[in-house]
Image (cartoon, helix red, strand yellow):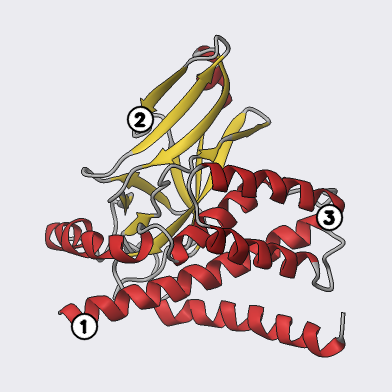
Amino acid sequence: MPRGARRTRAKRLALALAALGVLGLATGPAHAAPQILGIVASNGLPTPLHCVDGLCSAHLASFCLQEARYSPAAGSEYRLLPGGRIDVVVTLASGGSVRLPGERLLQIRTRSGFSSLGISLPESKLRALGAVAAAIDVGPGTTILPVANADDPNPQSAEEIAAAAGPLRRLAATTFEIRGEGADTARVVQLMINDLPALKSLSADAIPGIWRQVAATARQSGIQERSIAEAGAIVDDCRAGPDGANGFASSVCLELRQAELMTRLNRRYWDDAAAGS
């Protein structure tokens, strides 16, 4: 790769990290309630759960609904607000499937600021159902609230919660839940991140095969070719980087590029919110 292209890529990733600060990604005062978040709806593209060491988990794309609040620290716990839906779609050994409400099954924690979530549940719960596979399906209008601390000096008020889960979340649907827009690219990139084992031993040679499976799944769900191509370009860009021979480094690169993409979408959303206020 030409040295200039490497510098350009490194500069873009650095700008992605810097851009996160534009939307208040700095951690707030200790125990102060962080932002209420929305989760990008699956729109027919459920995210598979992967089970390792007794825990089944998935990565989901999310976005901020409260520009004035601080971004959550990594590992912040959230819960589902009424009006949204997170289902666990379980595939049974018999070939049938069952859909279970996720409110009481799933733990929701942030991974990277407002832009990425980790969803998990014990593998034992799936085994008890006779599951051979499971996936997370997020419905439209899904909003999550940070779990409150008893000593929170600035808790979320009832008015803030109503505004974020109501008019602000409905407005966000035009940016994050319409087919063919940037949110579809985000869905596909997030699915690719989810399917890459977070292990340093992952060979970069395995990435093209994983990408082909992700792209095929996206097509089957109705994602437009333009969004698949945009996601594919991000995958190729990360593989072609100076550390592209390391599959783990490629996974980290994808998470940075996803954060960059979600930051741009969130800025578009806040511009729309400001114009309508």
Marks 2/1: CA–CA distance: 38 Å
Quadrant in which residue 101 is drawn = top left
| Circle 3 or circle 2, nearest the eye | 3
Task: Please rate how many residues cluster around mark 2, counting C-alpha atoms within 10 Å: few if below 14, some from 14 to 19, many from 20.
Answer: few
Res. 25 in view = no
Res. 48 in view = yes
Which quarter of the rendering shows the N terminus? Answer: bottom right
Q: Earlier in the sequence, mark 3 or mark 1?
A: 3
Instruction: Identify the residue position indicated by label 1 in the image.
Output: 275
Q: Earlier in the sequence, mark 2 or mark 1?
A: 2
In the image, farthest residue toward the top: 94
Residue type, mark 3 in image:
Ala
Pointer 3 with pointer 2, Cβ within 8 A = no
Instruction: Identify the residue position indicated by label 2 in the image.
Output: 104
Secondary element under disc 1, as helix, strand or loop, is helix
Which quarter of the rendering shows the C terminus? Answer: bottom left
Instruction: Identify the residue position indicated by label 3 in the image.
Output: 204
